[in-house]
Image (cartoon, helix red, strand yellow):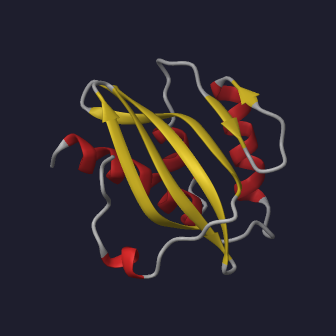
Amino acid sequence: MDEREAVLFANEAFYRAFADRDMGALAELWSRQHAVACIHPGWPPLFGRDDVLQSWQAILGNPNSPAIRCRQARAMVHGDAAVVVCYEEIDGRFLIASNAFVREGRVWRMTHHQAGPTSGQPEAEAESEPPRVH
């Protein structure tokens, strides 16, 4: 697996942990060695692993939290850092998200997540294509 594929795998693991409401898996994805931040839609920015993980615990523990599906993820790898930009589909509507990762040893760990409104949406035909690097 090349580095771009490894980053996309880590990104998919993030959305799988969210879908499964698996707080242990989600916590494992976030960096312990680097500063982390998270901006949920409509929330102020959160800084630090403890605050970020507490926010995810609240979201995953809420039975009314929506199901989210990652669509059209594209990775950009820059040495030991990477960014994934993707759409998040929620009940047929879309947010745009950016997820930042750093390589810690042989594993890609998340350092930042931000999702917010977008006027765009993924192209239907692009869904079957492999993610592209820009």
Q: Tell how many labels.
A: 0
Coordinates of residue 74 in the picture (x, y in percent): 39, 53
Coordinates of residue 121 in the picture (x, y in percent): 59, 70
Residue drawn at the location 67% of the way across and 36% of the way down: 38
Find residue 53 and report its image quarter.
Answer: top right
Find residue 65 and report its image quarter.
Answer: bottom right
Q: Nearer the viewer, residue 36 or 85?
A: 85
Residue drawn at the location 30% of the way across and 49% of the way down: 133
Residue drawn at the location 79% of the way across and 61% of the way down: 62
Q: Is residue 123 left or right of residue 74?
A: right
Find residue 82 and report its image quarter.
Answer: top left
Residue 13's place in the image compared with 98, above or below, is below
Coordinates of residue 88 in the picture (x, y in percent): 59, 64
Q: Is residue 26 left or right of residue 103?
A: right
Coordinates of residue 103 in the picture (x, y in percent): 33, 28
Q: Nearer the viewer, residue 98 or 35?
A: 98
Residue drawn at the location 35% of the way across and 51% of the way down: 8
Q: Nearer the viewer, residue 52 or 134?
A: 134
